[in-house]
Each structure stands twice: as structure tokens, then as C-alpha cells.
Image (spheres, rainbow, N blue to C red):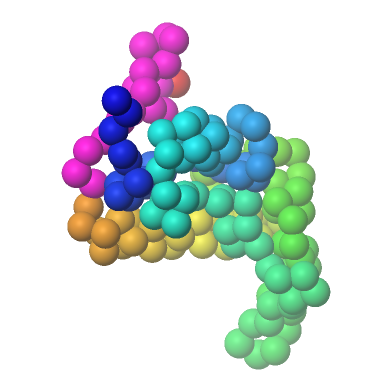
């Protein structure tokens, strides 16, 4: 007899950034396929991460500074606009930006940090996490605690 898991609330606790939830190697895709569908969980009771739009400007939007000047020369409508080489430079969290693109990247990283805080608040509003099912990688790492 298979237990009913429809009353459980599922919370996704990690994801690659930046990645589309539709990509087959995203955790969003994995948990949707193998946990939500696989265990028969209610998708409406699942708190899932979509990192593909965090910090991006709505199409055609422009940002302006306090005196009305354009804030950034580079408009960030797609992740490829923000991270053209696909690499996220985390040093921008602690150093000054030196180019217009780095200013955009720094702004996006700050919005990612804000998004993470808001996601944690959503978890607290649900009452926290009462049970966690984690994975151990083939090389023995737990989640992303490895180099």
C-alpha cells in the first residue's frame, strides 16, 4: 500500500543559478518529475525555485538614477545579458564594480540575495521545515558543500 502524500507541503531547498526551471538538469525540473509527480504530491503545495528571472528587467524597461540619468548602459532582459560568458563572478558581492556590465551584475547579485531572504521568509511562514530529504553525491558531498 502506497501512503498518500497529497497533504504534504514540498519545499525545494537548492538550485543552480542562473538556470531555467525547464532545463532537464535543474533541480526544479528534477523535483517536479521525481518528487511532485513521482510521489503524487500536490503541485499547488510545492514551493519551488525559479532562478531564471531574478534581477532581470521587464522587457523594454529602463532604470534611471536619482537625477534622471540612465542607471546602466546595459539592459538586463535575459540572463545572457547579465552573464554573457555564463560565469557568475561572486567577488562582485564584496568589491567595487569597474565596468557598466559589472554594475549590472552587482545589482543582479544583490537582488538574488534579496530573493533568497524572501524565500526563507516564505519557508518560515509555512512553519519551517519539519522533515528534510537530502542527497549525497557520488563523491560523498552533501548538497553543495564541496569544492
Of the pair 35 and 28, the residue shown nearer to us: 35
* Count of marks overlaid on the render: 0
Q: Look at 39% across and 54% down and name the residue there.
A: 45
Is 109 left or right of 118, judged from the image as shown? right
Taking the view exactly as shown, the residue that stands out farthest to the front is: 1
Q: What's drawn in magenta, residue-wise?
A: 129-146
Where in the figure is residue 121, as x and y percent of width and height? Answer: 31, 62
Please tell me whether residue 12 belongs to the stretch shown in magenta: no
Q: Vertically, is 27 above or below 54?
A: above
Q: Look at 60% across and 62% down and name the residue there.
A: 55
Where in the figure is residue 9, as x and y percent of width and height? Answer: 32, 50
Where in the figure is residue 117, as x and y percent of width and height? Answer: 36, 59
Q: Look at 75% across and 62% down and name the residue there.
A: 77
Q: Is residue 89 visible?
A: no
Please tell me whether residue 132 belongs to the stretch shown in magenta: yes
Q: Look at 33% across and 61% down and name the residue there.
A: 122
In the rendered image, which quarter contains the C terminus?
top left
Is 58 left or right of 96, judged from the image as shown? right
The answer to which quarter of the image holds residue 61 is: bottom right
Amino acid at each position: 500500500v502506497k501512503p498518500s502524500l497529497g497533504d504534504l507541503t514540498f519545499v525545494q531547498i537548492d538550485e543552480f543559478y542562473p538556470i531555467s526551471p525547464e532545463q532537464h538538469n535543474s533541480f526544479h525540473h528534477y523535483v517536479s518529475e521525481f518528487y511532485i509527480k513521482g510521489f503524487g504530491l500536490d503541485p499547488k503545495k510545492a514551493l519551488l525555485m525559479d532562478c531564471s528571472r531574478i534581477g532581470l528587467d521587464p522587457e523594454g524597461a529602463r532604470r534611471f538614477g536619482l537625477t534622471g540619468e540612465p542607471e546602466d548602459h546595459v539592459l538586463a532582459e535575459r540572463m545572457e545579458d547579465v552573464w554573457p560568458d555564463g560565469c557568475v563572478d561572486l567577488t562582485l558581492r564584496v568589491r567595487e564594480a569597474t565596468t557598466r556590465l559589472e554594475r549590472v551584475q552587482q545589482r543582479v547579485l544583490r537582488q538574488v540575495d534579496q530573493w533568497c531572504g524572501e524565500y526563507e521568509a516564505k519557508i518560515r511562514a509555512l512553519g519551517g521545515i519539519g522533515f528534510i530529504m537530502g542527497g549525497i553525491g557520488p563523491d560523498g558531498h552533501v548538497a553543495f558543500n564541496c569544492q
